[in-house]
Image: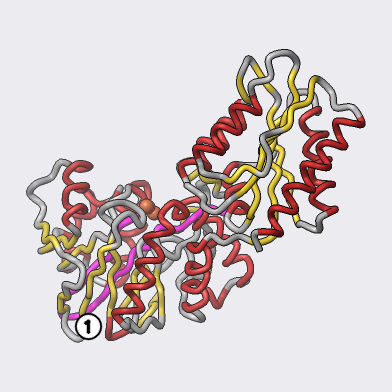
Amino acid sequence: MLPVEVKKDIYWVGAVDWNIRDFHGYSTPKGTTYNAYLLLDEKTALFDTVKKPFKDTLLHNISRLIEPRTVDYLIVNHVEMDHSGALPEIMEAIRPHKVFCSAMGKKALMEHYRRDDWPYEVVESGRTIRLGKKSVQFLETRMLHWPDSMMSYIPEDRLLISSDGFGQHWATSQRFDDQVDFSQLMRHSAKYYANILLLYSPLIQKLLGSVQQMGLPIDMIAPDHGLIWRGEPQRIIDAYAEWSRQQGKEKALIIYDTMWHSTEKMAYAIGDGLSQENVDFEIFNLKYAHRSDVMTEVLDARALIFGSSTLNNGMMPAMADMLTYLKGLKPLNKLGAAFGSYGWSGEAVKLLTGVMEEMKIELADAGLRVKYAPSHADLKQCIELGRKIGAAVKEKS
Ligand code: FEO
């Protein structure tokens, strides 16, 4: 894609990756973008680079605007390799006078690229550099998404270059929020939040508080992935405020894997119980549902109900995968229970319950096991379990 002017003399010069389908465990059926921005002033600054295979795209885009060697400053908001993979070759091509980064950014750059001869200049939150008519104020955002992360604010344009924050993994031919279907955009944003940022929700609340306290007016948010928020940037700020509170709504998820469909029958009967309590639910068979799509629904669900058959004294492999992923993303304020069928040893429900306890999921029930195939009476018990969880969900409202 050709450069796009996002504000006067500030250009998107990144790359669109139409083909990526897995982003460290997160399914990206619609690809992603690696956004980099070039600010032209008395001093020229490049904000971030791109993933290594896209370095030529970035260089071509810079070359369409200026001679790459005339870039004065490189600002590294984030070192993860989707933004810095191209950095060593870009450094050779542009030879900037300074590389601005956080203290953790410098450390991470050294540990990735082993270069102590680059002209690092470490900056802290609140430091401002002047480029000419415009300036850049740095805002350290540790752990959003890595310890090195920071954002760059251009006060003259009321523009926040937000690194991983407020992004989406969505490859499009458009660059702005007001050029795409807004509900799809919010759906991609929610998936991104649930799969990348959920565990840092307390830090996001702190960040939103500091931005409010600093009184930074924001007209545009330019993330390092996906669309730029120029139409209604407050909509994504409000969504982050809501998602980071993790209050959830009256919604339950039944997430299961099944060997011979017995656990599946239990899942559907639990759904019937939730229906009787008028609680919305979704059912995910992990043979078909991707962990990252389940995570998107976890974001606003109040109850998580896990089911697995017992396999070789353990749980089904897809369930172990799901729980490992989910545990790492640290969802808060959930309740739930476990269920599953078994043949003789029957450990799965106990194991699921143990993981739920570790995740501080409030148990609405000690767990329900059924031997081999569920009888009519067993399914009635499952319906009762669904009702019990449904009642607990409503009690939390
Ligand atoms: Fe888009 Fe944390 O990298």
Q: At x 71% / y 59%, what residue is drawn?
A: 394
Q: At x 40% / y 63%, what residue is drawn?
A: 204
Task: Indicate the position of residue 108 as horizontal and vertical percent values.
Answer: 21, 47
Which quadrant: the C terminus?
A: bottom right
Which quadrant: the N terminus?
A: bottom left
Question: Which residues are drawn in magenta?
Answer: 29-50
Number of numbered labels in the structure image? 1
Task: Indicate the position of residue 243 as horizontal and vertical percent values.
Answer: 52, 63
Which residue was labeled with disc 1? 134
Q: Amino acid at mark 1?
A: Lys
Question: Front-most of 38 and 397?
Answer: 397
Position above or below: 41 against 302: below
Tell me where residue 141 sits by quadrant. bottom left
The colour scheme of the drawn protein is secondary structure
Tell me where residue 215 sits by quadrant. bottom left
- Residue 149 forms part of the magenta stretch: no
Q: Is residue 53 left or right of residue 347?
A: left
Position above or below: 144 against 340: below
Helix, strand or loop for disc 1 = loop
Question: Front-most of 394 and 129?
Answer: 394
Q: At x 34% / y 70%, what residue is drawn?
A: 161
Q: Among all residues in the image, which is located at the extreme right?
A: 376
Q: At x 20% / y 48%, what residue is drawn?
A: 109
